[in-house]
């Protein structure tokens, strides 16, 4: 038999690249990758069955499986089984990764032939980093002035929240926005809303975000005071608990059960003829301690109530203002208040607000600017 005719009985011959087989992990992987590359049309994805590959390459299903795993391990091929057609695979070829794989191997082969001095090792090549001159953050802001205003608002918010590194926090927010990360702080800034306002969540135990029901807070404060804690420590621990959503939710459920028992007892007492049933002290209305209330009491202790009237003067007619224009606090009373650390800042504010008094502060004392 003629040898040429003998080979023609097997049909058309297929060719593979031996060098490609070395990069792909074997002949089967190279043949599979080549046939899939020939079947590609406009996209980098091709769908075919195992039988079609077997007819085109002669690879068995086991050989195809091994070839797929070799190609996937080198990130040059991705594949998945089609749900609608269980026998059909979808293959995605990554030619960029293949090119990188070949180039890297070539670079390794070239550098391996270079002779090296054992006493003077080659210097490390510097890492080339492209730096854009005069780099600026790109983002939704329309101008540099708007960006700076946003930064100032973020910095002020970070200081109010007590962040340990406000400048670093502001950088993270700006840098994240410039990289495409959506920030609610920018939306609030554009809408001219206080920063953080849209992110506050009002919990069930709060009358507004961050402010718990007074009776609930008072109940937790009394719990710690009964355990022997000082009042300041009890307030700090109670508020710390109520700022923790998980802890506060558990305490709130227990508080509601207690309120339910108190309400039932009060209703029974009212039915029995009691006009004002007993309620715990935490359920009674309590006055709020403010800076103004404290200052008022301290000024009363000093025996001069005119200072408080100077801070919040009532509305008067012109004749009344003329009559009371001489009501200026004395140097002695102001100096007494200035010696106390609690009222020192208040005295400074009052002197700054009322230059008509003619007083100033020098060397830790309140003096008259016009002694004569």
Image: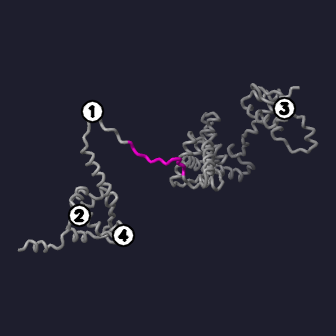
Look at mark 1 in the image and give the residue it sits on: 119
- The region drawn magenta spans 126-137
- The quarter in which the C terminus is drawn is top right
Look at mark 4 in the image and give the residue it sits on: 42
Name the disc covering residue 31, or none: 2
Look at mark 3 in the image and give the residue it sits on: 358
The mark that comes first in sequence, 1 or 2, is 2
Answer yes or no: is residue 205 visible. Answer: no
Answer yes or no: is residue 189 visible. Answer: yes
Residues at marks 1 and 4 touching, judged by CB atoms closer than 8 Å: no
Instruction: Give coordinates of residue 179: x percent, y percent.
Output: 50, 53
Q: Nearer the viewer, mark 4 or mark 2?
A: 4
Spatial CA distance of label 4 from label 2 is 21 Å
The mark that comes first in sequence, 1 or 3, is 1
Residues at marks 1 and 2 touching, judged by CB atoms closer than 8 Å: no
The mark that comes first in sequence, 1 or 4, is 4
Q: Closest to the observer: 124 or 50?
A: 124
Neighbour tally class for label 2: few under 14, some 14-19, many 20 plus, Cα within 10 Å:
many
Q: Closest to the observer: 226 or 77?
A: 77
Residues at marks 3 and 2 touching, judged by CB atoms closer than 8 Å: no
Neighbour tally class for label 3: few under 14, some 14-19, many 20 plus, Cα within 10 Å:
few
């Amino acid at each position: 038999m003629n040898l040429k005719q003998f080979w023609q009985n097997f049909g058309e011959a297929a060719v593979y690249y031996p060098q490609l087989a070395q990069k792909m992990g074997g002949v089967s992987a190279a043949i599979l990758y080549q046939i899939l590359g020939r079947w590609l049309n406009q996209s980098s994805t091709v769908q075919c069955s195992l039988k079609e590959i077997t007819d085109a390459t002669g690879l068995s299903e086991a050989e195809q499986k091994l070839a797929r795993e070799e190609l996937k391990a080198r990130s040059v091929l991705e594949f998945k089984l089609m749900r609608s057609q269980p026998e059909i695979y979808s293959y995605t070829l990554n030619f960029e990764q293949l090119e990188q794989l070949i180039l890297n191997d070539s670079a390794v082969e070239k550098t391996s032939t270079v002779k090296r001095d054992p006493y003077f090792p080659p210097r490390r090549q510097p890492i080339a980093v492209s730096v854009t001159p005069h780099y600026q953050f790109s983002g939704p802001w329309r101008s540099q002035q708007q960006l700076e205003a946003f930064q100032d608002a973020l910095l002020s918010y970070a200081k109010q929240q007590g962040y340990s590194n406000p400048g670093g926090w502001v950088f993270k927010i700006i840098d994240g926005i410039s990289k495409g990360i959506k920030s609610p702080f920018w939306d609030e800034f554009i809408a001219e809303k206080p920063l953080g306002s849209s992110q506050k969540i009002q919990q069930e135990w709060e009358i507004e975000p961050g402010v718990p029901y007074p009776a609930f807070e008072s109940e937790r404060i009394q719990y710690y005071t009964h355990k022997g804690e000082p009042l300041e420590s009890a307030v700090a621990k109670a508020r710390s608990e109520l700022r923790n959503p998980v802890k506060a939710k558990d305490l709130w459920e227990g508080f509601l059960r207690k309120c339910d028992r108190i309400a039932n007892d009060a209703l029974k007492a009212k039915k029995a003829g009691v006009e004002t049933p007993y309620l715990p002290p935490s359920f009674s209305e309590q006055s709020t301690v403010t800076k103004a209330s404290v200052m008022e009491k301290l000024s009363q202790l000093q025996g001069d109530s005119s200072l408080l009237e100077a801070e919040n003067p009532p509305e008067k007619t012109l004749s009344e203002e003329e009559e009371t224009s001489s009501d200026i606090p004395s140097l002695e009373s102001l100096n007494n208040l200035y010696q106390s650390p609690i009222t020192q800042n208040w005295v400074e504010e009052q002197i700054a607000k009322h230059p008509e008094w003619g007083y100033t502060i020098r060397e830790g004392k309140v003096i008259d600017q016009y002694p004569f």
